[in-house]
Amino acid sequence: MFRRVVRASKFRHVFGQALKNDQCYDDIRVSRVTWDSSFCAVNPKFVAIIIEASGGGAFLVLPLHKSGRIDKAYPTVCGHTGPVLDIDWCPHNDQVIASGSEDCTVMVWQIPENGLVTGLSEPVVVLEGHSKRVGIITWHPTARNVLLSAGCDNLVIIWNVGTGEAMIQLEDMHPDVIFSACWNRNGSLICTACKDKTIRVIDPRKEEIVGEKEKAHEGARPMRAIFLSDGNVFTTGFSRMSERQLALWNPQAMDEAISVHEMDTSNGVLLPFYDPDTSVVYLCGKGDSSIRYFEITDEAPFVHYLSTFTTKEPQRGMGYMPKRGLDVNKCEIARFYKLHERKCEPIIMTVPRKVSQALLYAFDTAGPDCAIEAEDWFEGRNGEPILISLKNGYVPGKNRDLKVVKKNILDNKLSKNAENTGTVNKSASSTPSIKNEGKLEEILKEIKSLKDLVSSQEKRIIQLEEQMSKIAI
């Protein structure tokens, strides 16, 4: 398949390992929707999985430590009226997740710090603007509260979640269904793969196409396109003979691919997951039972095959943990959450111990802090990711609640204190989420007791009315 040449790379001997059964998440009814999304989203606190749900759409949100068998009555996020097609965690707040659905809406949710206690049916904000199902959701990598959605109406919308407004609508650029959309490293450009077999690089704020390649892959099956950290575009697709392909493109000169590789003749769409710190791309095919990984360098043949991790069970979907959620003491360089028909299985990618940790984690990775605000980005500013060191592991900040900087729907709904404060400095920290959760639990208990009281009184009234009717007779 690939020319195997011995070359110096600290990732040549990366090996995958599935965790034991007691560390998996069992008895989960994974969604059967025919849509090529990953069905799973992960961050250092939670794993979210789209599930089968009657009468609408729902997804599970589980704290990472809650492995084992998941009770069928476990609370879900269930506000959509149609099946959920895609979910994505906010990179700047580990408790905020967005979902897109067949009901044509995008919803943004705030998950309590310790996970769900009761079902969550009230989103923080509902974003309405698509006329057909919404199959792609992706947050801006460096600007706070900027969210991209793409639907089967061939429309890309970029939202300011803080105000609930559709700020940019990219119409008439895609004549057919959009298969994928991806931001570049600093969020100044997006690249899309469309059913018309064209890869487009778009400047969303200028609303113009800055590069495109027709028939990037000539096969009719879905393509995927992602940005690499050097600005190049990596794509997966199918050849005219239905062979799966990988390709590397320079957006400034898309006439000819930098590199194209044929793989195999399987039907599963290849979902690419990219680690910008190590320049390793992991390919997870839908319906495959393997994860292939490649290193991308600036020397020919540019895309270097590393190895393949294989299991017995085919995968229904795949979640990819951000770098700051890895265990550096175990020399982890990636962690996947593989969806089976009825369970979610973590798979860790590890570098052998002979590669020193100091060398392995010499790079910094993107942290949870945003570089700029939504308003700044819409006005034309760009911000590079704010990096953190992983040498001693990632320690989450004590206060991960959203900060009140400007008028913000998320903050108003999350904390009533925001209404009482006049002007809040950018440096001022918000009320700790633990206190908010405590108050919320008290209110929920009080509401429950009041409901019980009302219910008992209603029964009592019905009994008295029956007695009165007998006396009247």
Image (cartoon, helix red, strand yellow):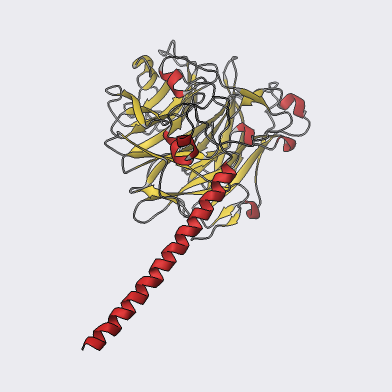
Give the residue at x 40% y 54%. 53
Which percent across, then down, holds residue 223?
A: 41, 30
Q: Position of residue 428 (x, y in %)?
A: 57, 28
Residue closest to the far top: 252
The front one of 274 and 165 is 165
Nearer-the-camera pick, 390 or 306: 390
Q: Quadrant of the N terminus?
A: top right
Q: Is residue 364 above or below residue 397?
A: above
* Quarter occupied by residue 398: top right
Q: Position of residue 75 (x, y in %)?
A: 48, 55
Residue plotted at (33% across, 30% down): 195
The answer to whether residue 293 is left or right of residue 237 is: right
Q: Which quadrant of the structure image shows residue 214?
A: top left
Number of marks present in the image shown: 0
Residue 384 seen in render: yes
- Image quarter hosting the C terminus: bottom left
State the residue in front, 188 or 471.
471
